[in-house]
Image (cartoon, rainbow, N blue to C red):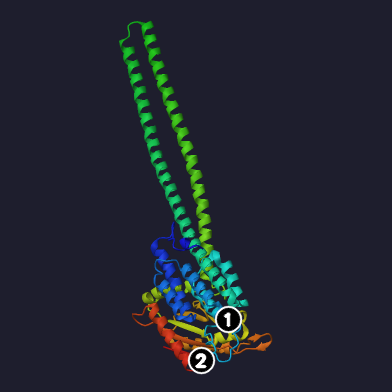
Amino acid sequence: MTAQNQTTEPTGGMNSADALRLRQQYVAALSQFINRLSLPADALGRVRQRLAGARNSPVEAMLEQIAAELERRQPQTALAAAPPASVPGETAPPTATEPPGDAIADVLLTLFERITLSPLTEQAAGKRREQLLQGISAEELPRFVNDLAELISQSLLLTQREKQELEEFIGHILEQLRRFDAFVRCSEADMRECRDNQAAFEQQWDEGAQGMAEQVSRATDLEQLKRDVNTQLEQMRECMSEFRERESDRRRRSEQANAEMHEKLDEMREETTQLRSRLQENRARLMKDSITGVHSRFAYEERIELEHVRWKRFDAPLSLMLWDIDFFKSINDTFGHKAGDRVLQLVAQLIDSRIRESDFFARVGGEEFVMLLPGTGTAEAERIAEQIRTLVEEADFKHKGNPVQITLSCGLSEFREGDSPEQVFDRADEALYQAKQAGRNRCIAA
């Protein structure tokens, strides 16, 4: 991407508010990314300065700058080359403190967890993530981050394009509705014309009939009467012929308009069906976590609002659990990220198999999962949490035939009067932190 392309603002379907919301998500992820990536002080300053202007500059440009900084310091990284031998009498150069390539790969994996890409870039994102899982060298990092910038750029473009397509479709529907309105108006005018034609014909016919009656009453000459009556009948026949011609023309125009309108309605039905199918497919992808198959954070944010409204309306107990896999980073470091993904999948399957039909379970990022338990107070929620914690603790996890101990920590909180979903989540998060501090593999209620 050129610098000119990087500074181009989104066009088409995405308005400034939508673009800002989407970019704020990337900026938050990049902030965490930069905090964990040990860049030199001068490079960090340059990147943070760019990040400060992120409200109006594309995120992919910032990622490219990070790639450039990685490339600048590439000769100094521990994986790039061995340090030169010391010369007698000279001071040895300082040891590089930058993180090795695998540490940066962990940071990039975290970045993948924190951002939401367009469903249409899911396959490409999966390939990039698989590349990270397989391992990348320090020399490959700058190019990889550039590829990630391109992926985010494509995701933004696709999101804008999808929104633009939707707006164009809505505009098309509105145009069809305008045509339909015009058709209705035309039909009303056609009916008025029909009534006017019929009224005109009836008036002319009545006038002709009245004229003949008058001629008959005044007639003194039979031959003259015949001629007058024949003339009057001819006029009435012409009147009838004109009326039939006008009606035939009117019916022809009406039938043509009806046929065109039915064709347009069929097109609208087909286009609506296609759009509904696409929206349902995109929604289904957004509602499912791509790694574990359980509900996604997007689904959680939708469900928590629904459950919060129900809780306020019916005043029934509602509890929230926040789960975290203990020492998950160590699992990734020891057995690899593929094994880590497998642990996420198995833990999600175990928990999902034990929740009740009315409960809700989702992965909200990294190794964190959330549960909503409608109709459940703190005491019952603690009992359920202990059952799940014990289930995972006693599960037979293995890696290449060797047993692996997996445990969970849990923080839970019940909704209280005046609570917002954010307040309950924060309390559960604080309780989870306490469970971690107390030694992990335990559940604590706020």
Mark 1 or mark 2, which has the lower sequence index?
Answer: 1
Q: How packed is label 1: few (under 14 Cα within 10 Å), some, or many (20 or more)?
A: some
For residue 440, the mark is 2
In the image, 445 versus 111, the foreground residue is 111
* Whole-percent x, y for residue 424 in the image: 40, 81
Q: How packed is label 2: few (under 14 Cα within 10 Å), some, or many (20 or more)?
A: some
Asked if residue 248 is positioned above or below residue 421 in the image, the reply reads above
* Whole-percent x, y for residue 410 in the image: 49, 87
Residue type of the residue flagged with mark 1: Asp
Q: For the residue labelled by badge 2, is the local secondary structure a helix, a strand or a loop?
A: loop
Query: Mark 1 against mark 2, which lies toward the viewer?
Result: 1
Task: Name which residue lies at 45% across and 66% down.
Answer: 58
Residue 284 seen = no
Q: Is residue 358 left or right of residue 193?
A: right
For residue 102, the mark is 1
Q: Is residue 425 left or right of residue 356?
A: left
- Give the CA distance from mark 1 to mark 2: 26 Å
* Whole-percent x, y for residue 350 in the image: 58, 82
In the image, 41 versus 26, the foreground residue is 41
Task: Name which residue lies at 57% across and 80% down.
Answer: 101
Task: Name which residue lies at 48% across and 64% down.
Answer: 156
In the image, 415 versus 47, the foreground residue is 47
Q: How many numbered callouts? A: 2
Q: For the residue labelled by badge 1, is the local secondary structure a helix, a strand or a loop?
A: helix
Q: Name the image quarter holding residue 204.
A: top left
* Whole-percent x, y for residue 316 in the image: 40, 79
Q: Residue furthest front?
A: 89
Residue type of the residue flagged with mark 2: Arg
Q: Residue furthest right?
A: 401
Task: Name which residue lies at 31% across and 15% down.
Answer: 214
| Quadrant of the frame with the C terminus | bottom left
